[in-house]
Image (tube, grey):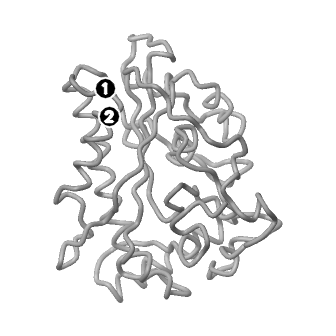
C-alpha cells in the first residue's frame, strides 16, 4: 500500500461519495451527500469505556463488537481502529428544509431514506475494501448483533451509536437537540466501521461533549427549540424522544407517502435554519 492507511481509507470513502451510488433517487439523480469528513479513533481509547456509563452498559467497545464478529480471534483493543465519517446534507436539501415548519421537504425525506441507503452501501464498501486488503472489519450498525434497547435514562438507545463514534473520532460534539455539531454543521448522517488496522487517531479538539453548541457554551441561541414542530426540545429537558418519534411515525410517514409518493419518514427541522446548520458556530 503506497498511501498510509488513513489516507487510503479517506480516498475510498470520498471516491464512493463521488460515484453514481450517491443519489437521492429523484428524476435528476441529484447527489444525496456533499464531501464527507473522516476521522479515526483508537480501539483502546478510554472514551469507549466511558460510553458504557454515559450511554448504557450494553454500548459496545470496539473490541466487543469485533469479538462478536470474529469469535476466537482475541484482538487487543490497541490493534483496532474505529473509522468514522460525516455525510453532510447538500445545500439544496438544507435550503428546502429551511422553508419548512412542520413536515420535511422532499429532498430531506429522500436524504433520510435513499441517502441512508447510500450510507449503508458505503459501510459495506469500506468493509469490503478493508477485507480485500487483509484487514478484518465490521460495520457495527449492520451487524446482526446490533440492537435498539429501552433505556432508563434515554428512553431508548442502542448497542452502537454512530454519533458517539464520530465524537470519539474528533468529528464533533452534541447540541441541545442531541444532534452532533461538526465543522460542517449538524445537517448530516454518520457512519462507522471497526477494523483491525493501525491508524493514528484524529485529535479531538474539544474536552466538553457540548463544546460546539452555543446554548451550552455561551448560554445563547436555543433556535432549535423554536424549529421543533412538536415541542420536543426544551432548555430544561433537552430532547424528548417520545414526542419526536410520535411526530415521525405515523405523521411524517403519511405525509411523505401522500405528497412525495414514496414510503419514508423524516423531519430535520432542528438541523436546518439554525446557527449550527452548516458550521461549528462556537
Q: Residue 63 placed where, x, y %?
A: 49, 22
Q: Tell me: residue 168, above or below residue 154.
A: above
Please tell me which residue is depicted at 24% across the width and 60% down the height of the picture: 22
Q: Which residue is mark 2?
A: 7
Q: Tell me: residue 75, above or below residue 120.
A: above
Q: Residue 82 placed where, x, y %?
A: 45, 32
Q: Residue 75 placed where, x, y %?
A: 44, 13
Please tell me which residue is depicted at 65% across the width and 73% down the height of the picture: 224
**Quarter of the figure with residue 238:** bottom right
**Quarter of the figure with residue 110:** bottom left
Q: Secondary structure at mark 1?
A: loop
Please tell me which residue is depicted at 69% across the width and 46% down the height of the picture: 209
The reply to whether callout 2 and callout 1 are in contact (CB within 8 Å) is yes
Please tell me which residue is depicted at 44% across the width and 26% down the height of the picture: 81
Q: Is residue 46 left or right of residue 32?
A: right
The count of marks equals 2
- Which numbered dot is residue 158? none
- 103 or 155, nearer to the observer: 103
Q: Which residue is mark 1?
A: 4
Q: Which class describes the residues within 10 Å of circle 1: few (<14), some (14-19), or many (20+)?
A: few
Q: Residue 222 placed where, x, y %?
A: 73, 72
Q: Is residue 51 left or right of residue 122?
A: right
Compute the Cα span from label 2 to label 1.
6 Å
Q: Which class describes the residues within 10 Å of circle 2: few (<14), some (14-19), or many (20+)?
A: few
Amino acid at each position: 500500500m503506497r498511501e498510509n492507511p488513513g489516507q487510503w481509507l479517506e480516498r475510498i470513502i470520498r471516491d464512493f461519495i463521488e460515484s453514481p451510488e450517491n443519489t437521492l433517487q429523484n428524476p435528476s439523480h441529484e447527489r444525496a451527500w456533499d464531501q464527507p469528513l473522516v476521522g479515526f479513533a483508537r480501539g483502546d481509547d478510554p472514551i469507549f469505556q466511558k460510553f458504557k456509563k454515559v450511554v448504557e452498559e450494553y454500548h459496545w467497545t470496539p473490541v466487543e463488537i469485533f469479538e462478536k464478529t470474529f469469535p476466537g480471534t482475541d484482538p487487543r483493543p490497541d490493534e483496532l481502529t474505529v473509522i468514522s465519517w460525516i455525510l453532510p446534507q447538500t445545500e439544496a436539501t438544507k435550503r428546502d428544509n429551511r422553508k419548512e415548519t412542520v413536515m420535511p421537504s422532499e429532498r430531506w425525506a429522500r436524504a433520510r431514506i435513499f441517502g441512508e441507503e447510500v450510507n449503508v452501501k458505503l459501510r459495506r464498501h469500506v468493509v469490503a475494501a478493508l477485507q480485500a486488503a487483509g484487514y478484518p472489519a465490521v460495520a457495527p450498525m449492520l451487524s446482526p448483533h446490533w440492537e435498539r434497547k429501552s433505556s432508563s435514562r434515554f428512553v431508548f438507545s442502542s448497542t452502537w451509536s454512530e454519533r458517539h463514534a464520530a465524537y470519539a473520532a474528533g468529528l464533533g460534539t452534541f447540541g441541545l437537540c442531541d444532534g452532533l455539531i461538526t465543522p460542517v454543521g449538524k445537517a448530516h448522517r454518520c457512519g462507522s466501521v471497526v477494523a483491525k488496522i493501525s491508524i493514528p487517531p484524529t485529535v479531538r479538539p474539544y474536552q466538553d461533549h457540548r463544546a460546539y453548541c452555543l446554548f451550552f457554551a455561551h448560554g445563547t441561541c436555543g433556535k432549535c427549540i423554536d424549529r421543533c414542530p412538536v415541542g420536543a426540545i426544551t432548555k430544561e429537558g433537552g430532547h424528548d424522544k417520545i414526542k419526536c418519534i410520535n411526530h415521525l411515525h405515523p405523521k411524517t410517514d403519511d405525509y411523505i407517502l401522500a405528497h412525495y409518493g414514496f414510503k419514508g419518514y423524516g423531519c430535520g427541522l432542528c438541523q436546518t435554519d439554525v446557527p449550527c446548520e452548516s458550521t461549528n458556530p462556537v
